[in-house]
Image: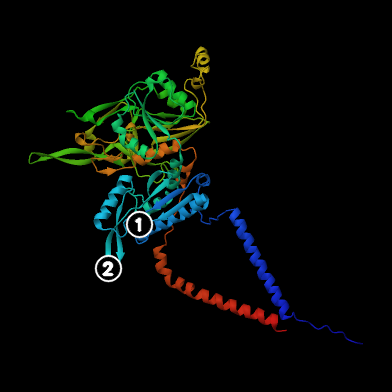
Amino acid sequence: MVEKTVNKTTTPASSRKKNSLVFLLGIFVILLLVNFIATKFYTRFDLTKEKRYSLVKPTKTLLRKLDDVVSVQIFLDKNVNAGVLRLRNSTEDIMNEFKAYGGSNFEFEFIDPLAGKSESQQIEIINEFKKKGILGTNLKVQSSEGFQQKYILPGAIVTYRSRQLPINLLENQLGYSPEDNLNNSVIGLEYKFSSAINKLQQHHKPRILFTQGHGELMPIEMLDLANSLEEAQYEVEEFDLSSSYRIPVDVACLIVAKPQTRFEEKDKYKIDQYIMNGGKVLWLRESVLADMDSLRNASQVFMALPVEDNLDDMFFTYGARINQDLVQDIQLCNPIPLVTGNLGGQPQTQLFPWYYFPMLIPAENNHPISRNLDPVATYFTSTIDTIKSSSVKKTILLTTTKYSKALMAPVRVHLSMLREKPDASKYNQPNLAGAVLLEGSFTSVFKNRIADSYKEATDTVKELKYLDKSKETKMIIISDGDMIRNELQKGGQGIWPLGYYSISGQTLANKTFLMNCIEYLTDEDGLIASRSKEIKVRLLDKVKVKEESTKWRVINTALPIALVFIFGIIYSSIRKRKYSK
């Protein structure tokens, strides 16, 4: 019997070399194909939990539709402290995202306009940027020679064609730690840049009308907000309801600021039909008449009485009610000065908390309008209730603190209450609403009240056609008319910024909140949604770091070496087993 053996043959060296070349060529072709596909179909993967590197859909749409070059100059230097460096890096990340979607129509650069300039030149440049709206700040920076002061301009200028808009990148909110302010600055980057681009692209400035004719605030008392709106590319006008038969439908937002006289039905009808046609309204209305000037009498007391402006039925129909009461808050309120004595013939004054001047805080729903805001100053404010309506969504924007209460009108307001320490147990009505957003389809207050003959007459004119149900729209109701009022400087020298309280020297978030309200009402593209993004600062547990530092140092040093050693043993074993025969 012959045993047949089969000898194992090995692959010739030339054949193995050929197979390797074919394999490498295949990898090269695959890489070329992947790169070609990547140029045609763009995508990015954001693996962070809060999607910090992802743009919201409206921003992506805005950038993809750019029809000309948008250029951004950013004035953030690398040679600063860690906080500003983080803001710079975050800005660069956002700019790279914008570039990815904007393509050749989006450009950006980082420059330091103060670099290499003398002190006098730097002061001149700083003043020029201040006129443009970019505010500088002084930092303590560590160098080889120790600590030194360095002035920076944490801002940017967005240019589109021949138009420009400035942006302040660094937030400086009262009551927030530097880390929180920095985090809020990073959160707001996308909205600030996308909003600026959107405004520069608009062919027509959105029209904002301030109503007059019903005892509203004087234009000079709202001048700071009006100036800010004009700087933000809005067209601002005054509008007397009694002088026109209707409110133009192209008006982006109607502002009714502290009316104090009665509205006739014809004027209410004009506002109502403006809303029915999709108009947006910012209401700043007071239901109780109260003024500090009324306390300047011998008894230092007055009665706060309800305001009869004939608007209650409108608000009730739309889905909200401003109650005839006054709010007191003992936890957060502005002070007033009182004379406490006399020294050398000069009266001595002292500041006391005035509970009728509550500072409202953002509600806990993190709405883009009020998110990350400082407190907002109010003066004799009332509470707001919402009315059940299936077609209208209600969102509370501002509330009192947990130590507040409301007193029903008529209210006896007197200074003697400051002589006694408040009993916190009596301030047991927490989080009273002071500002509410209503969104949806509203019912006309004149439904079933208009004569058929009038309907027939108005229906013949398209612009006057009566509607009893609105298009999808929105309005904001604020229960304090003075929230929009800027203080006048003594002697008629000018105005103070909106939100500045001259008695305490503190500036609160009134302007920011109202600008957010108007931008939300007029924002048809939904860009403000980016303000609701949240970026969490994940700080290390310092106690745990101290306790376990040795363990983690050993792991970080020894583990990589051990893994390489284990991999080498396994690889050598596989090669030995493969080629030993």
Q: Residues within 10 Å of mark 1 (few under 14, many from 20)?
A: some
> Is 403 displayed left or right of 390 in the figure?
left
Point out the image quarter for the N terminus: bottom right
Residue that protrudes farthest toward the top in the picture: 453
Classify 147 as above or below 288: below
What residue sits 59% from the left and 76% below the top?
A: 567
How packed is label 2: few (under 14 Cα within 10 Å), some, or many (20 or more)? few
Residue 53 is at least partly visible in this image: no
The answer to whether 122 appears left or right of 100 in the picture is left
Instruction: Determine the image quadrant of residue 271.
Output: top left
**Eye-nearest disc, 1 or 2:** 1
Residue 368 in percent (x, y) is at 44, 43
Residue in view at x 46 percent, y 50 percent: 534
**Amino acid at circle 1:** Asp
107 lies left or right of 337: right
Q: Is tag 1's residue or tag 2's residue first in the polypeptide sequence? A: 1
Query: Which residue is tagged 1?
Result: 112
Residue 111 occupies quadrant: bottom left
Depth check: 113 or 338 in front? 113
Count numbered badges in the picture: 2
Q: Which mark is residue 224?
A: none
In the rendered structure, which amino acid carries the disc numbered 2? Glu
Left or right of 501: which side holds 460? right
**What distance separates the C-alpha of mark 1 from that of mark 2?**
22 Å
Q: Residue furthest front?
A: 162
Q: Circle 2 sits in a helix, a strand or a loop, which is it?
A: loop
User: Residue 562 at x, y = what percent?
Assistant: 54, 77
Q: Secondary structure at mark 1?
A: loop
Tag shown at residue 145 = 2
